[in-house]
Image (spheres, rainbow, N blue to C red):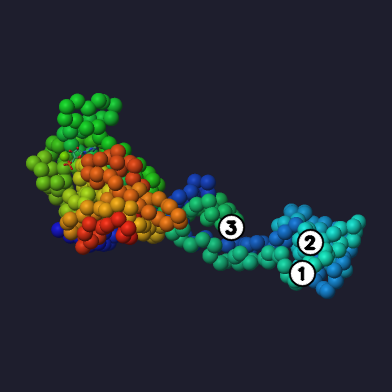
Amino acid sequence: MINYNEAIEIIKSEISKIKLNLEEVDIFESYNRILAEDVIADVDLPPFDNSAVDGYAIKFSNRNQWNIIGEISAGNYSSFNLTENDAVLIATGSKLPENADTVIPIEDVNVNGNNLQLKQNITIKKGINIRTQGNDLRINEIALKQFTKIDSKSIAVLASCGKEKVKVYSKLKSALLSTGNELIPINEKPAEDKFRVSNIYSLYTAMKEMNHTVINLGFTKDDKALIRNKVGAALEMNIDILITTGGVSVGKYDFLKEIFAELGVQEKFWKVNIKPGKPIYFGVYESDNRIILVFGLPGNPVSSLVNFYVFIKPAIDYLYRQNSLNKFTAILQNDLKKKDEKRHFSRGVLYIENDELKVTSEFSQSSGNLVEMSRANCLIEIEESRLNPKKGEKVKCILI
Ligand code: AMP
Ligand code: MG
């Protein structure tokens, strides 16, 4: 059985074969999309020398008194040719008059009619309170780099560069199919030996959280012919990723692996030395110059979602060159049981106390406990060789 690191490398090398398409979106639709080109400044930013404060623009000299000859407010420029004797009232962001090289903040002066006087004990330096043209960015320089994820900060740069339309990478298209004789729709009350199909909802949402497209193929019984039809049809769809759940272990009704092989999916690995989520299958389906990554996840809702967080999400981030800041080192607040040499992804609650990151993990860690998982905000990642981490030790946490 391969280890986690080997498995993730295999997935990364396969996912990088997916050719990302480009599309143009309206700037308002660009939130959370990934830039597909460098954005180049078409103007200097700021476009002209302007005042950083409300104050008086002067031509610097040793004097401490001036004659106020006019005013400039934002967006209302008028031309003044300042001598050392002159001052112009100027508002924040307003273009500086010719010859002005310094702005005295309004708080530092006394005004009497047209007379402007520096307050006692105030000294000024040449050049203060001016934002010079192009100081933020020069025309033709790169304002935002390709692969930037658009957020409230970067969108302001797009706007300042006049990008009404933004070139972004297309979203991935994925499809989702659950399998299991025990599954019933969520609008039914489970009788006897049935479970509501929760998996579809968690994986659908996990894909949506990453801002990708998901087609819900529903769920099907553990009937080989039925599943084969559904998977076969899915592989004909225009998708990049197929995710199935259930039927990938070693039970009598676990048909998925066989079906994938029959349909021409090339197995890259089956089973990884981790807990939970060990039975994960990964393969690729190639036809007509396109590739579909196939993830056969275990049916267990906790396992399949953990598989998503530790395999599928990092692989997609890798494809779109996103460096997710979602790993933290925290101090463990309780002993954790780990007797085997698998890599564990235990559910935990990460929090801050006295400016320190701490993590508790007082859950049963049973991979059947969905509600427990819903209360966790991180996975505590314990490497293969590490056994029984103790309270007070540092552990790696992945935000989920
Ligand atoms: P399997 O991987 O098919 O052996 O499934 C393991 C267990 O996970 C099953 O016994 C069910 O309890 C549960 N399960 C399987 N599929 C789903 C699903 N789609 N939604 C919720 N629970 C599921
Ligand atoms: Mg099953």
User: Quick check: 315 left or right of 86?
Assistant: left
Q: Nearer the viewer, residue 266 or 331?
A: 331
User: Looking at the image, which residue sits at the far left?
Assistant: 252
Q: Is residue 379 visible?
A: no
Helix, strand or loop for disc 1: loop
Q: Position of residue 136 (x, y in %)?
A: 61, 64
Question: Quick one: label 1, few (<14), some, or many (20+) residues within 10 Å?
Answer: some
- Answer above or below: position of 291 versus 119: above
User: Which residue is under mark 1?
Assistant: 124
Q: Nearer the viewer, residue 353 or 162?
A: 353
The quarter of the rendered structure image containing the N terminus is bottom left
- 3 or 2: tag closer to the N-terminus: 2
**Which amino acid does the dot numbered 2 rest on?**
Asp
Q: Are discs 2 and 1 less than 8 Å apart at CB?
A: yes
**Which amino acid does the dot numbered 1 rest on?**
Ile
Marks 3, 2: nearer the viewer: 2
Question: Quick one: label 3, few (<14), some, or many (20+) residues within 10 Å?
Answer: some
Residue at 13%, 43% (x, y): give it.
Answer: 254
User: Which residue is under mark 2?
Assistant: 108
User: Which residue is under mark 3?
Assistant: 161
User: Residue 18's quadrant in the figure?
Assistant: bottom left
Q: Quadrant of ligand 2?
A: top left
Residue at 67%, 62% (x, y): give it.
Answer: 47
Q: Nearer the viewer, residue 219 or 377?
A: 377
Residue at 50%, 52% (x, y): give it.
Answer: 151
Classify mark 3 as within 8 Å of ligand 1 or not, answering yes or no. no
Helix, strand or loop for disc 3: loop
